[in-house]
Image (cartoon, rainbow, N blue to C red):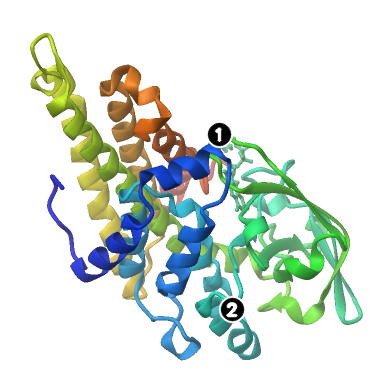
Amino acid sequence: MIHQEQSHQDIRDAVRSLCEEFPADYFRKVDEERGYPEAFVDALTKAGWMAALIPQEYGGSGLGLTEASVIMEEINRSGGNSGACHGQMYNMGTLLRHGSQAQKEFYLPKIASGELRLQAMAVTEPTTGTDTTKVKTTAVRKGDKYVINGQKVWISRVQHSDLMILLARTTPLAEVTKKTEGMSIFIVDLREAIGKGLSVQPILNMVNHETNELFFENLEIPAENLIGEEGKGFKYILDGLNAERTLIAAECIGDGYWFIDKVTKYVNERVVFGRPIGQNQGVQFPIAKAYVNVEAANLMRYKACELFDAHKACGAQANMAKMLAADASWEAANACLQFHGGFGFAAEYDVERKFRETRLYQVAPISTNLILAYVGEHVLGMPRSF
Ligand SMILES: Cc1cc2nc3c(=O)[nH]c(=O)nc-3n(C[C@H](O)[C@H](O)[C@H](O)COP(=O)(O)OP(=O)(O)OC[C@H]3O[C@@H](n4cnc5c(N)ncnc54)[C@H](O)[C@@H]3O)c2cc1C
C-alpha cells in the first residue's frame, strides 16, 4: 500500500484476510457469469461483518458508523464490490429507529445472524424518478391487511433477500397538506409476496448489479408490517439516508485506493520509449491529482462518521462525503483505465469491471446534481429549485 494506513487497523486486518479468500478471479468470474457473489456475502455474514450496526442486545456487534464504513471501504479496496450486500448493513436502520419493540425483537436478531436477509429497499418508481413525493404505489388498509398496487424500478438484491422495505402512499397526494406527508413504510416478506401479488423482472445492466423492476397487483400484507406511524414514511426514509450516503462514500474511497494502487504499480513497471511510463509527468499528474482528491474526500467521510456517531446533524457532511468520494473514485478510475492503455479494457486486469462499478455512484443512490441541490438549498440557503 502506498498511502498512509488509517485508523481501525484490527478491523482492516480481519476484513482483508476474509477478502483474500475471494481474490480478483472470483469477482471476475461472478461478473462474467452475471452471477451474484453468494459465497462471499455468506462469508461476510457468518463472520458478523454485516451485523456491525445492529446493537448487541439484538445480536449484532453494536459498532459505530465509522467502523461500519471501514468494513465497506476494505471490501472495495480489496477488489470486491460492497454493492452486492451493503443493504444488509444499513436497511435495518429503519426498523431499528422506527420499528415497534415487537418488530425489533422479531427481526433484528434474525437479521444479525443472517437467518433473514433485509437487503432490499423499494423507493424509486419509473414515472417519478428522484421526485419521491410523487410515488404512485399505493397501500390501502382493508381490515387487518394493506393492499399494495403499483410499480417500482431499480430495486436491488430482491432475489437475494427475504425481506424488503417498501415506501408507498397511504393518503393520496391531493389530500395531504404537505407533499412529504401521507407516505408509509412497510416490511414486505418477499418469500410470501413473490408470485402472490408481487412479480419481479430482473434488469440487465452495465454493472452486473442484481436489480429489478417490481409489479404489485393487489399484494396483501399484514397491517402489522407497517413500520412506525402511518403517513410518516418519507421522514423515516430520509432518516436512514445519512448512513447510506456515508457508507457508500467509504466504498468509493475503497475503490479510489484500489485504482490508485493498481495504476501506480502498473506505470512503474510498464516500459515504453525505454523508460517506465510513470516517469512522464503527463502520466504522473492525473494519478497524483486523483490521489489528492481521494485523500480529501476521505477526510469528509470521517467527519460525517464522527458527527453521525456523536448523534449530531450530519446531512451536509454525509452528502458532501458521498459526492466528493464518488467524484474522486471516478477520477481515479479514469486515470487507471487510461494508463493501462489497451490492457485497461481486458477483463483479466479487473480495471474495466471496477470502472463500471464505481461509475454507478455518480447516479445512485443519489445523483450528484441532487446533492448539489441539497447543499445549495439546505446548507447555503438559496431558493428551492424543485
Ligand atoms: C444499479 C442501480 C441500483 C439501484 N438500486 C436502487 C434500490 O435498491 N432502491 C431504490 O429505491 N432505487 C434504486 N436505484 C435508483 C436510483 O436511486 C435512481 O436511479 C436515482 O436516484 C436517480 O433517479 P432516476 O433514475 O429516476 O433519475 P431521474 O430522477 O429521472 O434523473 C435523471 C437525471 O436528471 C437529473 N435531475 C433530475 N432532476 C433534477 C433537478 N431538479 N435538478 C438537476 N438535475 C436533475 C439527475 O441528477 C439525474 O442524473 C438504483 C439505480 C441503479 C442504476
In percent of width and height, residue 269 lies at 14, 26
* Residue at 28% from the left image edge and 68% from the top image edge: 14
Q: Is residue 244 left or right of residue 267?
A: right
Mark 2: secondary structure: helix
Whole-number angstrom distance, CA of label 1 to CA of label 2: 35 Å
In percent of width and height, residue 287 lies at 20, 30
Q: Is residue 175 above or below residue 383?
A: below
Mark 1: secondary structure: loop
Q: Is mark 2 within 8 Å of ligand 1?
A: no
Q: What mark, if any, has residue 206 been given in the picture?
A: 1
In percent of width and height, residue 256 lies at 29, 42
Does residue 61 show up? yes
* Residue at 19% from the left image edge and 66% from the top image edge: 9
Q: Is residue 361 left or right of residue 265?
A: right
Badge 2 density bin: few <14, some 14–19, many ≥20, Cα 10 Å: some
Among the 4 quarters of the image, the one containing residue 177: bottom right
Q: Nearer the viewer, residue 384 or 171?
A: 171
Q: Is residue 226 left or right of residue 260?
A: right
Q: Is residue 61 above or below residue 197?
A: below
Front label number (1 vs 2) = 1
Q: Nearer the viewer, residue 121 or 262?
A: 262
Badge 1 density bin: few <14, some 14–19, many ≥20, Cα 10 Å: few
- According to the picture, the residue beneath numbered tag 2 turns out to be 98
**The residue positioned farthest toward the top in the image shown:** 273
Q: Quadrant of the C terminus?
A: top right
* Residue at 23% from the left image edge and 32% from the top image edge: 263
Does residue 317 show up? no
Q: Is residue 177 above or below residue 291?
A: below
Amino acid at circle 1: Met
